[in-house]
Structure formats: structure tokens, C-alpha cells
Image: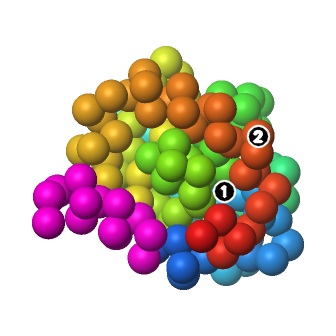
Amino acid sequence: MTSFSRLIFSLILVAWSGTALAGDVAQNLGAGNVAIKGYDPVAYQTQNAAVQGSDAFVAEHNGATYHFASAANRDAFQASPEKYAPAFGGYCAMGVAFGKKFDVEPTAFRVVDGTLYLNLNSDVQSRWLQDVPGNLEKASSNWPEIADKAPVDLR
């Protein structure tokens, strides 16, 4: 099996798991509607790092709860949430390029032109990074059609 075939197989298996809560399928949210598994969305851009947020610093945006490593990061997010919130509702950017919604590993990320993109894992991210412009074009084209669909409905 080629590495591309393994990638596709992995993506299909993950699709069966479904990740969004029933309340908001346009966002990849965990328990308590926490986005990005509690990682700080501002740190991705200001530190180029995946930094775990704290329950002490939280903000709500579009029904999602974001955690931050500091009050300063929380305040920056509140001043401009669209600048820091992840693309594609926090779903895997490569999955969206395939017309699917997959969960993410918050450490598999890339900020491109000021936008945070997350991936399922480092293997999927490696594939995504081989053609970022092409994959973003596909994902951006697919997103309007799948945004309001549950992950399990995109099998």
C-alpha cells in the first residue's frame, strides 16, 4: 500500500468516528464546547507554537469556548476573534480538501497568511504541506458545501 493510499484509508477511518457535537456541526468542538482541545489560538500566531490554554483564561466566540495561556492572549482574541479562530471551524484542513470533516491534533498546525490551519496528525499534515495552495483551494471550495453537515454524514 502506498503512503497516499494509507493516508486516504486513515482519513476514511477517522470520518466514521464523527467529531462534532450535535449542537454545532460547523465547528469541531469537544466536551463543554471547547475549541482546539483547549489550545491557545493566539499562541499559534504570536509564538508559532501549540500552547495549551488554561481554564483561568477563557473566551466565547460563536458558541465555542477558547482557552488561553494568558490574559493578554485572551484579550487579543476578544479584540479580533476572526484573526485567531482556526479555519474550517477547527476541522482538519486536509480533510476539508477531501470534502470531509476530521478531528485534529492541535500540534499539527500551520499559520498561512495569518490564518490558522489544523490537521488530523503529522502524517496528514506532511501530505497537506506538499501543496498548500492547491489544498487550500480545494478546501475553500468544499467548505461552503460541508460546513453545516455532520462529520458522519460525509462518509
Whether residue 20 is visible, yes or no, is no
Mark 2: which amino acid?
Answer: Pro
Image marks 2 and 1: residues in contact by CB distance under 8 Å: no
Would you place residue 149 above or below residue 32 in this image? above
Taking the image as shown, residue 142 lies to the left or right of residue 6, namely right
Residue 147 drawn at (x, y percent): 75, 51
* Label of residue 144 in the image: 2
Mark 1: which amino acid?
Answer: Tyr
Q: Which residues are magenta?
A: 1-13
Q: Secondary structure at mark 1?
A: strand
Taking the image as shown, residue 34 lies to the left or right of residue 50, namely right
Residue 29 vs residue 97, the one in the foreground: 97
Predominant SS of the magenta segment:
helix
Residue 51 drawn at (x, y percent): 40, 53
Q: What colour scheme governs how the chains and residues are painted in the rendered image of this protein?
A: rainbow
Query: Circle 1 sits on which residue?
Result: 66
Would you place residue 42 above or below residue 69 in this image? above
